[in-house]
Amino acid sequence: MKPKNTEPQTERQRALRRGAVRSAVFHTAVQLVSAAVVLWVRAGLDPAGFLAKLLLVIIVLDIGGILPVWISLKARLKEIEGGEEDAAAQY
Protein backbone atom coordinates (compact mmCIF):
# COMPACT_ATOMS: atom_id res chain seq x y z
CA MET A 1 0.00 0.00 0.00
CA LYS A 2 1.34 3.39 -1.02
CA PRO A 3 1.52 6.18 1.56
CA LYS A 4 -0.76 9.09 0.88
CA ASN A 5 0.62 12.31 -0.50
CA THR A 6 1.11 14.75 2.36
CA GLU A 7 1.32 17.84 0.13
CA PRO A 8 -2.29 19.01 0.76
CA GLN A 9 -1.71 18.67 4.50
CA THR A 10 1.35 20.88 4.42
CA GLU A 11 -0.54 23.49 2.39
CA ARG A 12 -3.38 23.30 4.90
CA GLN A 13 -0.90 23.66 7.74
CA ARG A 14 0.63 26.71 6.07
CA ALA A 15 -2.80 28.27 5.77
CA LEU A 16 -3.56 27.53 9.42
CA ARG A 17 -0.23 28.99 10.51
CA ARG A 18 -0.77 32.09 8.37
CA GLY A 19 -4.22 32.58 9.86
CA ALA A 20 -2.97 32.16 13.41
CA VAL A 21 -0.16 34.67 12.92
CA ARG A 22 -2.48 37.16 11.23
CA SER A 23 -4.92 36.84 14.08
CA ALA A 24 -2.22 37.49 16.69
CA VAL A 25 -0.87 40.48 14.77
CA PHE A 26 -4.38 41.91 14.33
CA HIS A 27 -5.17 41.46 18.03
CA THR A 28 -1.90 43.14 19.00
CA ALA A 29 -2.60 46.07 16.67
CA VAL A 30 -6.11 46.51 18.04
CA GLN A 31 -4.83 46.40 21.62
CA LEU A 32 -2.14 48.99 20.88
CA VAL A 33 -4.56 51.30 19.08
CA SER A 34 -7.07 51.07 21.91
CA ALA A 35 -4.33 51.77 24.47
CA ALA A 36 -3.24 54.80 22.41
CA VAL A 37 -6.82 56.11 22.27
CA VAL A 38 -7.25 55.72 26.02
CA LEU A 39 -3.87 57.39 26.57
CA TRP A 40 -4.99 60.27 24.33
CA VAL A 41 -8.21 60.63 26.34
CA ARG A 42 -6.20 60.49 29.58
CA ALA A 43 -3.90 63.29 28.37
CA GLY A 44 -6.76 65.78 28.58
CA LEU A 45 -7.48 64.97 32.22
CA ASP A 46 -5.93 66.09 35.48
CA PRO A 47 -3.10 63.58 36.11
CA ALA A 48 -3.86 63.47 39.84
CA GLY A 49 -7.55 62.70 39.37
CA PHE A 50 -9.25 59.36 39.94
CA LEU A 51 -10.35 58.98 36.32
CA ALA A 52 -6.81 59.54 35.03
CA LYS A 53 -5.50 56.85 37.38
CA LEU A 54 -8.27 54.48 36.37
CA LEU A 55 -7.50 55.02 32.68
CA LEU A 56 -3.83 54.35 33.38
CA VAL A 57 -4.75 51.01 34.96
CA ILE A 58 -6.90 50.21 31.92
CA ILE A 59 -3.99 51.02 29.60
CA VAL A 60 -1.63 48.76 31.55
CA LEU A 61 -4.14 45.90 31.53
CA ASP A 62 -4.78 46.43 27.83
CA ILE A 63 -1.09 46.25 26.96
CA GLY A 64 -0.60 43.39 29.42
CA GLY A 65 -3.10 41.34 27.43
CA ILE A 66 -0.76 41.22 24.45
CA LEU A 67 1.77 38.79 25.93
CA PRO A 68 -0.71 35.92 26.50
CA VAL A 69 -1.77 36.18 22.85
CA TRP A 70 1.79 35.55 21.67
CA ILE A 71 2.25 32.72 24.16
CA SER A 72 -0.97 31.16 22.85
CA LEU A 73 0.24 31.67 19.29
CA LYS A 74 3.41 29.75 20.06
CA ALA A 75 1.35 26.85 21.46
CA ARG A 76 -1.03 26.99 18.48
CA LEU A 77 1.85 26.83 16.00
CA LYS A 78 3.17 23.75 17.80
CA GLU A 79 -0.29 22.15 17.54
CA ILE A 80 -0.48 22.90 13.84
CA GLU A 81 3.05 21.60 13.22
CA GLY A 82 2.34 18.44 15.19
CA GLY A 83 -0.77 17.72 13.16
CA GLU A 84 -2.99 17.38 16.23
CA GLU A 85 -5.93 18.98 14.46
CA ASP A 86 -5.55 16.65 11.47
CA ALA A 87 -5.39 13.63 13.77
CA ALA A 88 -8.52 14.76 15.64
CA ALA A 89 -10.38 15.25 12.35
CA GLN A 90 -10.03 11.54 11.60
CA TYR A 91 -12.29 10.58 14.52
Image: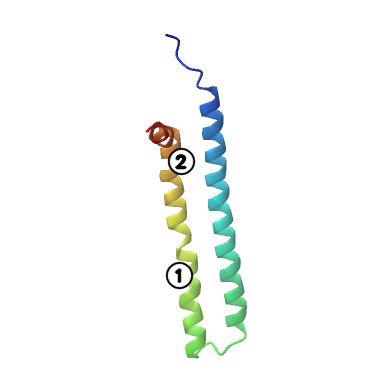
Q: Give the percent coordinates (x, y) of residue 20.
A: 52, 46
**Quadrant where the C terminus is found in the figure:** top left
Quadrant of the snapshot with the N terminus: top left
Residues packed near mark 2 inside 10 Å, few (<14), some (14 to 19) or many (20 plus)? some
Dot 1: what SS? helix
Q: Which numbered circle lies on residue 61?
A: 1
Is residue 12 shown above or below 73? above
**Label 1 is placed on what type of residue?**
Leu
Single out the residue that lies furthest toward the top: 1
Marks 1 and 2 sit apart, C-alpha to C-alpha, by 25 Å
User: Of the residues under marks 1 and 2, which one precedes in the sequence?
Assistant: 1
Where residue 39 appears, as percent x and y from the top left, is 58, 76
The amino acid type found where label 2 is placed reads Leu
Can you tell which mark lies on residue 45? none
Q: Secondary structure at mark 2?
A: helix
The answer to whether 70 appears left or right of 91 in the picture is: right
Callout 1: few (<14), some (14-19), or many (20+) C-alpha neighbours within 10 Å?
few
Colour theme: rainbow
Tags 1 and 2 in contact by the CB under 8 Å rule? no
Percent x, y of residue 45 = 58, 88
Residue occupying image coordinates x 58% and y 55%: 26
**Which numbered dot is residue 77?**
2
User: Residue 59's spot in the image, x, y percent?
Assistant: 50, 73
Residue 48, compared with residue 9, is above or below; it is: below
